[in-house]
Amino acid sequence: MSDEANDLTTDSEPEYISRDEARQYALAGDIAHLQGLGSHLTSRYAAAARAARIHRTDLAYLRRILTTTPGRDSVELLLRLLGEQEAAGGSMGLELPLMATMLAQHQSPAVLARTVFTDIPEGDRLRELRTCLFHELLLRGVDPDEFPALRPGWLPPLDWLPDRRRALETEPDFTRHSVNGSASGVKTGLPTHGRLDPPTPRPTGKSPLLNSVTVDEHNLIVTAAERNWGYAAAWVFRADRPIIPAQVPALLPTLPMDCVADLGPDGRYEIAARPVGDIWSLLFATASMGRSGRYGAWGRLQAWRSLAGLCGLPFHTSAAEVEREAEQYTWFHFQTDSEFFHQDGDDYGIAALSPDGLRLAVLAATDTD
């Protein structure tokens, strides 16, 4: 804990001013008295704000100690403190999604089933924690049928998510946490298998296809990268005649997209065909581990939303429909050295070709603003 906290006096009652007296000073023209009063209050406010920051930091550290110390006693005390802190000061920066991912990493499912998911009080203040933890455990391979107690009260919009880990949710990566900090790394590099890099120099002609993305489509496609990455953009092209998958690698650099606008015939352009599970994993890593990552549960939701947008499905589509459609699409992962991507190794593009070949959607994400 902060040594500074020991010097703070927190048990005394706050000092209030008499508003009537302050008004009388003003009416009497006693500005000097009001100035002294204002300086006194400003000083006390600054001290209180400083004390609040110190206490908030110390409480956050205590929560990290409890989440990373295995055992039922640690989890029960954490729940008690979280409830007290939420009741005392609202959210108080409790970081419930972070607490959920740390619990999933450091505590056994059996302990969590006997503590977090049992004896849930009426008017539960920690509903987000329980819901997030449920999805964190699912993504880590925990079978909820083996732990019947893992059944939180659902929290919109997380209640949209499947209550089972789906086949396309392959190999999710998670942030790693200790009592002193966190580490993460999004794997955006292309694999060696499935490569479809066209030969250089590439043709410099431009495709007649035009971007027809709507505002709703764009916003849904970029969900996984929105506010979690640096910048993301989306395009949708609708063709009169079917595009076959073999045409996509050569077609992408010719499309009117900022992410390839200055590529030229010899610029680095690498592309690979990927299974939909790899695309979901990339979207999940972007959403859950970016610089403003949302961790497992919210990252899972954002990955599914982006997948739906890339498949041309509306926001209200069920997860089952998104899964069926996504498995029919052909998926590509590409990287270039265009200015849009700032030549950063963490930048990437995704292209999704519809089963009928008449719709091609593209997401380009860079971790540079």
Image: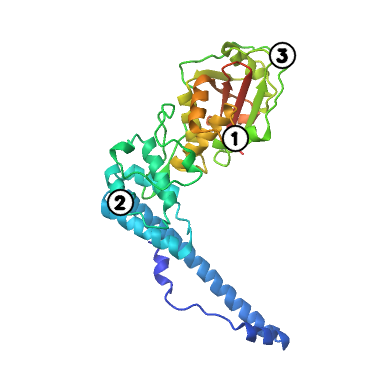
Say which label, 3 or 1, has the lower sequence index.
Answer: 3
Residue 354 visible somewhere in the drawing? yes
Label 3 belongs to which residue?
A: 205
- Residue drawn at (31%, 55%), measured in percent from left and top? 76
Residue 347 horizontal side relative to residue 63, left or right: right
Per the image, the residue denoted by label 2 is 115
Query: Within 10 Å of the Cα at label 2, are there few (<14), some (14-19), or many (20+) other Cα atoms?
Result: some
| Percent x, y of residue 270 | 56, 19
Residue 69 falls left or right of residue 242:
left
* Dot placed on the residue nearer the N-terminal end, 1 or 2: 2
Q: Residue at x 61, y 12 (%)?
A: 200
**Quadrant where the image shows the C terminus:** top right
Do the CB atoms of the residues marked 1 and 2 lie less than 8 Å apart?
A: no
Q: Is residue 307 above or below residue 83?
A: above
Instruction: Tell me the quarter of the picture where residue 264 sits.
Output: top right
| Quadrant including the N terminus | bottom left
Residue 263 on image: x %, y %: 66, 21
Q: Nearer the viewer, residue 334 or 168?
A: 168
